[in-house]
Amino acid sequence: MFLVQPIQAQNYRISTYPDLWYNDTDGIRLGLRFLGEVEGTFKDGPHRLDAGIWVGSKFPENPVSYYFSFTEPIPVISDFGSEGNIQFISSIRTGYSMHQLRLNKRWQQEFDDLDYTELSFFGSYEKNVDSSYRFDPGGWSDTWKTLVGLDGVFSRDFDQFRTHNSAQFLRELDQGFNSIQFQSVNRIKLSDGVHLRTRFYFHQADANSYNEYFGYLWTNAPAFWLQNGFKRASGTIPDSWLTDGFFHFSGGPNLRGYSDHAINGFERSVYTQYQTVYGVNFEFVYPNPIDKVLNKNEIIGDLVEFQSYLFFDAGGGENEVQKQVPVSAQNEGMIFETGTITDAGLGFQFSVNIPDYLGKDRGIFIRYDIPFWISAPSNNESNFKLRNVIGIGAIFNF
């Protein structure tokens, strides 16, 4: 039995903040965010609350949505910077109902926020309750899912080298399928302002998995879009920007040159999913005059960054032989492996980043990528062509 400290009303503070967002089903979603903590603990004490409640201006079938997270440290497995806690999360928003219990443990070397290991065991009961919020409504299940899983993170920072590795094992108990994800992100400093970034990604779902757990080549599987406010619901980013290949979300194999290209005869790779996907990404970052000007100001230089880089992506997707994958209402049929496909180009990234109290990135990352070469063009296009892709989210996010 774990003992927790009782909440003392006289020193417990709840702060409220207005919140405004948009998606096509809710319209303007207006609400309040609530952050609760014991005064003076600076988000590192007992009884931590993170919650919100919203109302959609279009008054859909379920106009009121909420998110609730309550975290309680467990003293017997906690130390300074190395907390263990139990966390309860309940949420019904953007057409998805999720209720989860997590046991989290972090190991950290005192004040070094970049050198840490985290493990998280969780159980979750969730369902897609309204497909009108989904970018690809035909590709989602509509039954309750009972999930158990394990998340792990291993992060280290050295003078010339930085690595961030994460993995997830997920099992659905009713359907009996497994899903695994692994990602390794690394940065090697070559000289001042010059470094090489590498990333490896792998995701596999069992053949009997729900459709939302099958992977894309250009970003991560739909089930994981729920973790990102820009991707969570259709219309926050116009759907036409995605289907036209103009817009790209970081994640998954991240083949940014194939956002608007057919693979194995399908009209849009956006709608093509695979049981197994893998990818490697390389970026060679070099100095540019804009970033040098920003860095001259000590305050702005720590928060704002403008990067220029050359990139190369390689990856592919595989399915079991003659597997029927109902990837969407528009495109049903046999999908076989793609083989390894590649792209290369030039890119720029503007970021405003204010790390949280654990040193993790918290900000917005806007990219402009020019994948001028791809190895497997469609519609008799040339391998070399001027292509433009706007992206949100850092591909090499630490």
Image: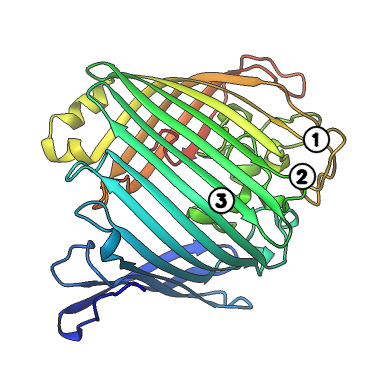
Number of the label disc, if any, that sits on residue 159: none
Q: Position of residue 371 (x, y in %)?
A: 54, 23
Say which residue label 2 marks.
207
State which mark lies toward you, 2 or 3: 2
Residue type highlighted by circle 3: Phe
Residue farthest to the bottom? 9
- Left or right: residue 187 versus residue 354 is right
The earlier-in-sequence mark between 3 and 1 is: 3
Does residue 188 appear in the picture of this structure? yes
Number of the label disc, if any, that sits on residue 224: 3
Q: Residues within 10 Å of mark 2 (few under 14, many from 20)?
A: some
- Foreground pick, 106 / 337: 106
Above or below, comparing residue 4 to residue 372 in the picture: below
- Left or right: residue 148 versus residue 325 is left
Give the structural element (helix, strand or loop) at label 1: loop
Residue type highlighted by circle 1: Glu
Q: Residue at x 72, y 43 (%)?
A: 271
